[in-house]
Image (cartoon, rainbow, N blue to C red):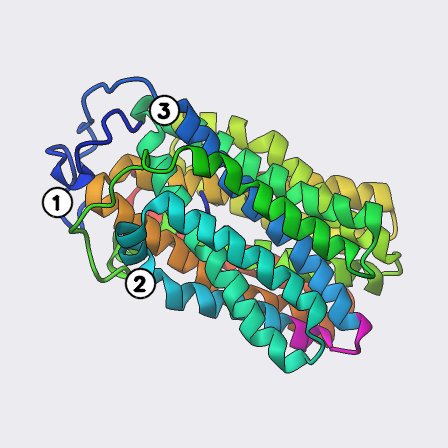
Amino acid sequence: MDQTSRQTVASMSHSIAADPFAATPGRPLPKDSRRPPKGPTDLWALVAVISGITGVGAALSLSLPLLSIVLERRGISPSLVGVNTAVAGIAAIMVLPFVTTLARRFGTARVIVLAFVAMSVTLMGFFVVKPFVLWFPLRFVFSASITLIFALTEFWIGCLAPPDRRGFVVGIYTAFLSIGISIGPLILALVGTEGVLPFAIGATAILAATVPVLFVSGREPLLPDGGQKNLLRYVALAPLALFAALVFGAVESGGTAILPLYGTAIGLAASHSVVLVSAVAVGNILSQIPIGYLADKVNKRVLLLGSAAVGAVGALLIPLVHDHFVLLLAVLFVTGGIVTGLYTIGLTQLGERYHGADLASANAAFVMMYAFGMLIGPISLGAGLDLFPPHGFAIAIAVIFAIYVILGSLRILSDGVGD
């Protein structure tokens, strides 16, 4: 889907772990606790982080529908397409424990660059390799590389964002992720899904995203020691934010992979089906900065539940407008834009509650939950399309959002609105 996604380095010579204002392990900062004012944000580093996440978005949005369509063309069922896509979740879960070790040893920027190179090579590998069984290790390497970039850029943005504008900066970060997501389907709509050209364009675009990162190598924040080793503990400490990542991951990855198949199932041409993904992405681009601004001003728990409720209603509207292409695009535009707030708001909440080592651990937990979503989303949405064609896809999305709204509401009733 990951929902993430969705956190000012003033002095690169000091370790974040030495921050006297950092939360104690496993605990958020008190509500009135803030870091002292820092120097200006490193704008070049911000550009590099945004470049990285834009590249991830482009890679995801081009590869997921492209690979799904190629597999369908080869006679692979939607359920098996979902299983292959779900390898992304397994790869993310397996690579997350090694993210900080790799970044400390080789440097955050260097790991990001190497991950982009691996993504580019494996994307071309999908074109070269024909046996379906070999697509599983290819998908694993491709998705593990994406996980490294997600985890490290989210930590980096959390360090760059000033406390009083955290939601706004995360909103910009998420908006550029959405810009990247919008690029992939547009490429497919222009060049088609056959032959080597879409793979070559995607691989080249991924490599281009590494250039700004190379320029800021050595200026990234130091990854701190400490923090909770048991990432699941953060699920108990910040359940609404962490489960928002799971829901967003499920719907984003599953939706991006299966939505083009849903489009063909309702009678759309392949070129029109990939435009459905672009409608969601354009909504994301236009909505994330306003949502990030709201996250700095409005209760985040209420915003999270509101975003999920819109997702549930929007998914139920899809079958009602499926035979009106413009209305279908409008529903996907509005719904997709608002539900991506789960990623932006969740990251903002974590950045507000945690600092130092705990911020790195909480971000890793956020990515882990997003990965769990990537694991269950493609399988459940693909199965929905298979078992209840064609609208079981939309119903499955509605159910995922509804479960989050119900459980989140019960949490608020027992624990209060909080922050």
* Left or right: where 258 falls relative to 216: right
Q: Name the residue under label 3.
A: 42
* Left or right: where 235 falls relative to 49: left
Callout 3 crowding tier (Cα within 10 Å): few <14, some 14–19, many ≥20: some
CA gap between label 3 and label 2 equals 28 Å
CA gap between label 1 and label 3 equals 27 Å
Residue type pointed to by label 3:
Asp
Q: Which residue is drawn at 47% across and 29% down?
A: 47
Q: Is label 1 in contact with label 3 (beta carbons under 8 Å)?
A: no
Q: Is mark 1 on a helix, strand or loop?
A: loop
Res 231 label: none
Q: In this view, does 80 lie above or below 357?
A: below
Q: What element carries label 3?
A: loop
Q: Where is residue 350 in the image (x, y as percent from the top left)?
A: 32, 42
Q: Mark 1 points at which residue?
A: 24
Residue type pointed to by label 1:
Thr
Closer to the camera in the image, 204 or 49: 204
Q: Can residue 407 be seen in this view?
A: no
Sequence order check, earlier mark of 3 and 2: 3
Q: Which residue is drawn at 74% across and 71% down?
A: 71
Closer to the camera in the image, 17 or 289: 17
Closer to the camera in the image, 409 or 93: 93
Sequence order check, earlier mark of 1 and 3: 1
* Segment tinted magenta in the rendering: 73-81
Quadrant in the picture for residue 345? top left
Quadrant where the N terminus sits is bottom right
Magenta-drawn stretch contains 358: no
Q: Is mark 2 on a helix, strand or loop?
A: helix
Mark in front: 1 vs 2: 2
Quadrant in the picture for residue 67? bottom right
Closer to the camera in the image, 345 or 273: 273
